[in-house]
Image (spheres, rainbow, N blue to C red):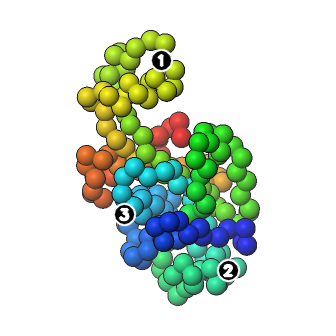
Amino acid sequence: MSNVSPSTPSSGASEPNPSGSSPIAASPLTRAVLEIDEYASGLGWEQPARLFALVDTARLRSQEPELAAQLGLDGDEAGAPLTPIEQDEIPAGTPLDEFLATIAWPDAVAGCALTVERQMLPASAEAQVPDGLDDAALTKWVSKHPDRQEVRMTVAVLRDGARESALRLREKDSPKEVLTGSDLVPGL
């Protein structure tokens, strides 16, 4: 497990839920996604993409007790089954899909999660998109569209293929307004 270590981002936080409270959710993966969403929400909007390793909490406690203690997981046997550990920042200027293709995780990592912010349009706006726009022009066009919405997406995937997503709209920035589901962000 020595390949997995918490990063220390500029905010000073090293794990997604420094308060120790856990969201109530139907599955351990949903719980981890909501915990990461809560953490990202505390950092505010207009943040870079963030990558997290998802590790089995019990395995972390037994194999890396010092790291578990550093993360506040020692003695909390009823805690979340999965612990998200934020990784180093994603290099600026590197396309996200290219960066993700370079990652290899040690066996101790059960899965990973990513949180990104994007602008989206309702399906009704698809017919309005001008033809022939490259990615940069399309991004600019969307950013000026009156119906655009800012969204934070958190997607987690386990080694067995299980996945979960959380979606938070900036205009409804409340934990009670976060949508969850395995197919909310199929392309990420």
Residue farthest to the top, as pictured: 131
Q: Nearer the viewer, mark 3 or mark 2?
A: 3
Element assignment for label 2: loop
Of the image marks 3 and 2, the number of the one nearer the N terminus:
3
Q: Is the residue under label 1 in contact with that under label 2 (CB below 8 Å)?
A: no
Element assignment for label 1: loop
Callout 3: 10 Å neighbours few (<14), some, many (20+)? few
Element assignment for label 3: helix
Relative to 94, say whether 81 is above or below: below
Identify which residue is drawn at 44% across, 74% down: 18
Q: Which labelled disc corresponds to residue 42? A: 3
Q: State left or right for residue 175 relative to residue 81.
A: left
Under mark 1, the amino acid is: Leu
> Which quadrant is the N terminus positioned in?
bottom right
User: Mark 1 = which residue?
Assistant: 133
Where residue 188 appears, as percent x and y from the top left, is: 54, 40
User: Mark 2 = which residue?
Assistant: 64
Under mark 3, the amino acid is: Gly
Task: Calculate the distance from the C-alpha at mark 2 to the C-alpha at mark 1.
Answer: 50 Å
Relative to 68, say whether 14 is above or below: above
